[in-house]
Amino acid sequence: MPINIKTTQNPTSESTATDRRAHRFHVPHLHLQSVFGDDWFSLKAEAFARFFGTPRFLIAQTVIVALWILVNVLGLTVFDIYPFILLNLAFSLQAAYAAPLILLAQTRQADRDVAHAIADAEHREALHSASEERSALAAKQTALLVEMVGQNTQLTQTAKALAERVETLTLEVHKAVCNARTA
């Protein structure tokens, strides 16, 4: 996992606040983080179970088994002859411990996945609600703008009619004044 130097050196940085804000829907499900606890055994058991599926483990096991068989077949030592009963017992013992550890890791991961799925669903619902609120606000503001444009159009028409009336009255007063001077 890459280390964010900015976050490491300044834990109150903006990215930490962003992480907290982004994970706010996961907070109610933190109690599900560790189904079998956060004790040493649970954490080591899960880590060990995860190690069983790695190429490093498979290669190491293959090398050990090959060496076991070679040492016993070539006769360098005789602690487990041909049917390799001791090797079979070792595999059985490994399987007896590996199966419950793998199931433990799978159960813990499944519970974390469920918690994350619930948190993601809540996040999507919150986003949908916010989107609906924005859409309703936009519709309300659009209706208000349409009403204001209508009022503006009406005021413009009234102003035009008044301007025409003022012009007509001005012409009448001008004619009356001009006729009074000539008479």
Image (spheres, grey):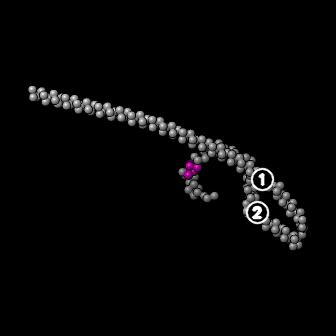
Q: Rate crowding at label 1 as few (under 14), some (14 to 19) or many (20 or more) other CA atoms within 10 Å.
A: many
Compared to 161, does 92 lie above or below? below
Vertical side of 168 occupied by 89: above or below: below
- Tell me the CA gap for discs 1 and 2: 17 Å
Give how far across and how far down residue 81 sits, in percent.
Answer: 90, 67
- Tag in front: 1 or 2: 2
| Residue 112, x across and y down, in percent | 69, 48
Q: Residue beneath label 1, please?
A: 101
In the rendered image, which residue does mark 2 sit on? 58
Residue at 69 percent of width and 44 percent of height: 31
In what element is the residue under mark 1?
helix
| Position of residue 140 measured from the top left corner of the image (x, y, whole percent) | 47, 35
Q: Quadrant of the C terminus?
A: top left
**Image point (79%, 65%), residue name:** 62
Stretch of the chain drawn in magenta = 15-19
Q: What residue is rendered at 20% in x and 31% in y?
A: 170
